[in-house]
Image (cartoon, rainbow, N blue to C red):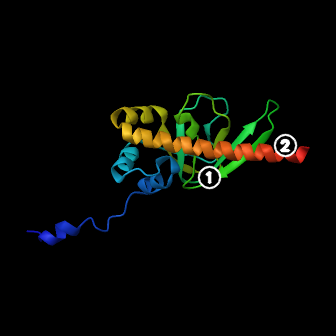
Amino acid sequence: MKALWENLFTHWYKQESPTKTVIKQIPVFHKLTNKQIREIENLVHKRRYKSGETIFKQHAPGEGMFIILSGKIEIFTEDKKGNKKTLVLLGSGEFFGELSLLDSDTRSATAIAHEDCLLLAFLRPDLQSLSKRSPETGNKILFNLAKIMSARLRKTSEEVTEANSESV
């Protein structure tokens, strides 16, 4: 027969999963409760990519966002002549492609694995399904996405204004 105390304290020191830890740090999921984070954790899809493998291509339809659990991702654009311009190199704990949660427009850039990667995919159909089941959770995520888009738009506006003033 086991002691009662052993059963009460078994899970006190249990660490949360790496997936849950990363999800909690992503601004898209800011201010979600532990229960809501668990829901997201059950929805995301783990995907592995080898170095050099394409995650998505510029002009391909967007399906959702990705969170980097491990590895590095290069985001770049190519012009019609094939000239490549690297926009950013992202690492563990960062995310990309979140605009595709809002619309099914085409990707504005290409994403490739700069090294072997483990990613979490959170797809638009998952968000839509979650929003129907739990409108509060869906609304929090959509509000967070709006804040992220707003911040990026402001930064882009500042950069355009700065570039225009330098060229005058």
Q: Are marks 1 and 2 in contact (CB under 8 Å)?
A: no
21 displayed left or right of 157: left
State which quarter of the image contains the N terminus: bottom left
Q: Nearer the viewer, mark 1 or mark 2?
A: 2
User: Foreground residue, 38 or 45?
Assistant: 38
Counting from the top left corner in percent of width and height, residue 124 is at 48, 33
Q: Amino acid at mark 1?
A: Lys
Disc 1 target residue:
72
Disc 2 target residue:
164
- Cα distance between the residues tagged 1 and 2: 33 Å
Q: Is residue 58 visible?
A: yes
Residue in view at x 39 percent, y 49 percent: 37
Residue in view at x 11 percent, y 69 percent: 2
Residue found at the far left of this picture: 1
User: Foreground residue, 146 or 63?
Assistant: 146
Q: Say how many tags the image has.
A: 2
Q: Secondary structure at mark 2?
A: helix
**Residue 168 lies in what quarter of the image?**
top right
Q: Mark 1 or mark 2: which comes first in sequence? A: 1
Counting from the top left corner in percent of width and height, residue 108 is at 67, 34
Relative height, residue 97 to residue 90 (above, below) = above
Residue found at the far right of this picture: 168
Q: Amino acid at mark 2?
A: Asn
Q: Is residue 45 visible?
A: no
Counting from the top left corner in percent of width and height, residue 39 is at 36, 45
Residue in view at x 76 percent, y 36 percent: 78
Q: Secondary structure at mark 1?
A: loop
